[in-house]
Amino acid sequence: MSGTPTPKQALILWCLLGRYGSALQSALVPKIDKADREALLAGRYVEATKEGRSLRLTVTDRGWNWAGEHLRAPLPPSFRVLQDWLERIGADLAANGRTLAELVGPAPEEPAPPPAPTKKKAAPKPKKPTAKQLRARIEKAYLALTGGERAKAVRLSALRTELADLDRATVDAGLAAILSGDKTARLSQFSDPKSLDAAERAAAFSPAGEPFHILWIQS
């Protein structure tokens, strides 16, 4: 290239200087053509380093010096507004004896990248108890509600609350096993259906449409 950057190449320098002299090529607008980039590299106005999948372009001391001395250098016609502002900036720097580097200042520290999100491990699903374990759990809950006594009526609403760590289907499976032939336990109904409240109706075990509300476990 010639000793002076073309208007388009000068625009690239100003794009970089607007970002404190260094930026990823992919972040710059307008898009940089390879020929212009290579010309600036050959003229030692910028340096390029690989960063990820992109190139980081950095203005060299030569590039800074050229820009500071050529604030009136022509830019592409569509960037006339930038051309006018650069002339105003150049006049101000000359009047106050300041350099372009002093105006731009040092680049701010880039914030540290946020830590990568950690994947939370899904809590292991609790294993369903076996039929024997379920029967033992029901009896343990029954005795907790009766104070350790047997042959006492326990409402299923209270039993389900005591077994709140088990889902309804699991408790129902245990009640179904009792109903199917457990010789030491039985299910029964309230003698007066009118005495049932909403909680008792909701807690009822109704395997065939006939609701049961009470559990007895014999000695």
Image (tube, rainbow, N blue to C red):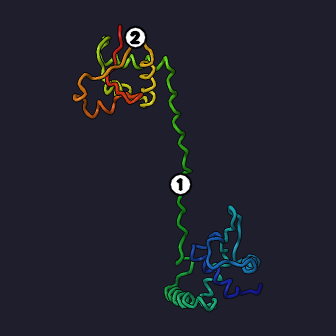
Residue 164 appears at what percent x and percent y? Answer: 38, 29
Q: Which mark is residue 50?
A: none
Label 1 sits on residue: 114
- Residue 31 position by quadrant: bottom right
* SS under mark 2: loop
Labels 2 and 1 touching (C-beta < 8 A): no
Q: Nearer the viewer, residue 99 or 10?
A: 10
How far across and how far down the image is residue 107, in percent? 55, 69
Q: Which residue is mark 2?
A: 184
Image quarter for residue 167? top left
Q: Amino acid at mark 1?
A: Pro
Residue 55 against residue 83 in the figure, above or below: above
**Does residue 126 lie above or below 73 as drawn?**
above
Q: Earlier in the sequence, mark 2 or mark 1?
A: 1
As displayed, is residue 33 above or below residue 187?
below
**Looking at the image, which residue is at 62% across and 86% down?**
69
Question: Could you tell me residue 84's position as x and y percent?
Answer: 54, 91
Question: Which quarter of the picture shows residue 201?
Answer: top left
Disc 2 versus disc 1: nearer the observer: 2
Q: Which residue lies at the image location 53% right of the left edge and 54% below the top edge?
A: 114
Three-letter amino acid code at disc 2?
Thr
Q: CA distance from mark 2 to mark 1?
A: 62 Å
Q: Position of residue 95 (x, y in %)?
A: 50, 89
Q: Residue furthest front?
A: 209
Give the quarter of the figure containing the C terminus. top left
Q: Residue at x 53, y 88 (%)?
A: 85
Between 32 and 208, the residue placed more toward the observer is: 208
- Residue drawn at point x = 66 percent, y = 79 percent: 63
Q: Nearer the viewer, residue 11 or 26?
A: 26
